Image: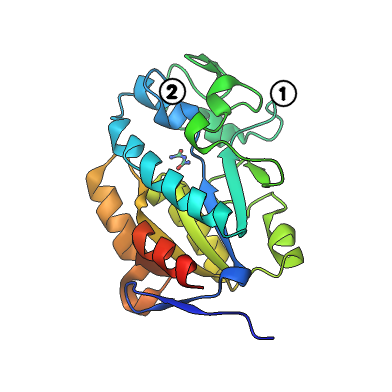
Amino acid sequence: MQDKVSFVNAEPYAFELVPARCALVIIDMQRDFLEPGGFGEMLGNDVSQLRRTIEPNRRLLAAWRAAGLMVIHTREGHRPDLTDLPPSKKLRGRGETTIGDSGPMGRILVRGEAGHDIIPELHPEQGEPVIDKPGKGAFYATDIQSILQNRGISQLVVTGVTTEVCVNTTVREANDRGYDCLVAEDCVGSYFPEFQEMGLKMIKAQGGIFGWVTSSAKIIAAIGES
Ligand code: C5J
């Protein structure tokens, strides 16, 4: 029997969503990036720019789970001994407090620390893979590709933070590996409004050079139909 297809109104043109072949990938919705008092805010960023994505992500995740579709969560972070932290990443920005140092919610971007965890609103459920990634993209030095292949996934709905960094890097990595990526614009966020706008434009430009962009409401409507 053929898998069902739902057409999602998207830019630059309709996305042919095949729910049985599509995973929802939620990028780095971690406490240190999103919560007041976390590392992101400590660096002077306006976390409200990211927090506006929580509710749309919560609704999309609930619909995705209710439809019994595959969900994958990612977290950016490093081993406690920092052996997987490139010296260049440690030094970049010349900050006083950098990755691995003590921050407001434990050691910054270190696995197992409170700030590294996913926010409670979007916490993974039993059976949902969590990809711990040392880089910006979800495919670098992780097993996400085997997980997707083993489940017959060929499309990704991508959400999370930040739009121009880990979301864009993951979409580009996935695109090069042959995945069709649909980004939910209200479910991705940047600390910088201009990067939010350009980060989305770059994905859908030139006929969808990296993928498609739509809203979470349209994705929810499409999975409801199928
Ligand atoms: C992510 C970052 N998740 N901005 N990380 O985008 O450093």
**Residue wearing tag 1:** 81
Q: Amino acid at mark 2?
A: Phe
Q: Name the amino acid, label 1.
A: Asp
* Residue hosting label 2: 39
Q: Is mark 2 within 8 Å of ligand 1?
A: no
Check disc 1 and report its element: helix, strand or loop: loop
Tell me if 206 is positioned left or right of 62 in this view. Answer: left
Which residue occupies 51% across, 46% down? 27
On the image, the x and y values in percent for residue 213 come to: 36, 65
x and y, in percent, of residue 25 in the image: 55, 54
Mark found first going from the N terminus, 1 or 2: 2
Q: Are marks 1 and 2 in contact (CB under 8 Å)?
A: no
In the visual, does 198 lie left or right of 159? left
Colour scheme employed for the rendering of this structure:
rainbow
Q: Which residue: 58% across, 44% down?
A: 74
The residue positioned 69% from the left and 49% from the top of the image is 141
In depth, the one of 88 and 157 nearer the eye is: 157
Q: Quadrant of residue 200?
A: bottom left
Kindly report which numbered mark, 1 or 2, lies closer to the viewer in this rendering. Answer: 2
Q: Nearer the viewer, residue 216 or 180?
A: 216
Q: Position of residue 119 (x, y in %)?
A: 50, 31
Is residue 108 something one can see in this rendering? Answer: no
Q: Is residue 147 above or below residue 13?
A: above
Q: Is residue 208 visible?
A: yes
The answer to whether residue 45 is above or below residue 129 is: above
Residue 66 appears left or right of 112: left
Measured in 3D between alpha carbons, the distance from the residue under mark 1 to the one under mark 2, in whole angstroms, is 20 Å
> At x 41% / y 44%, what residue is drawn?
162
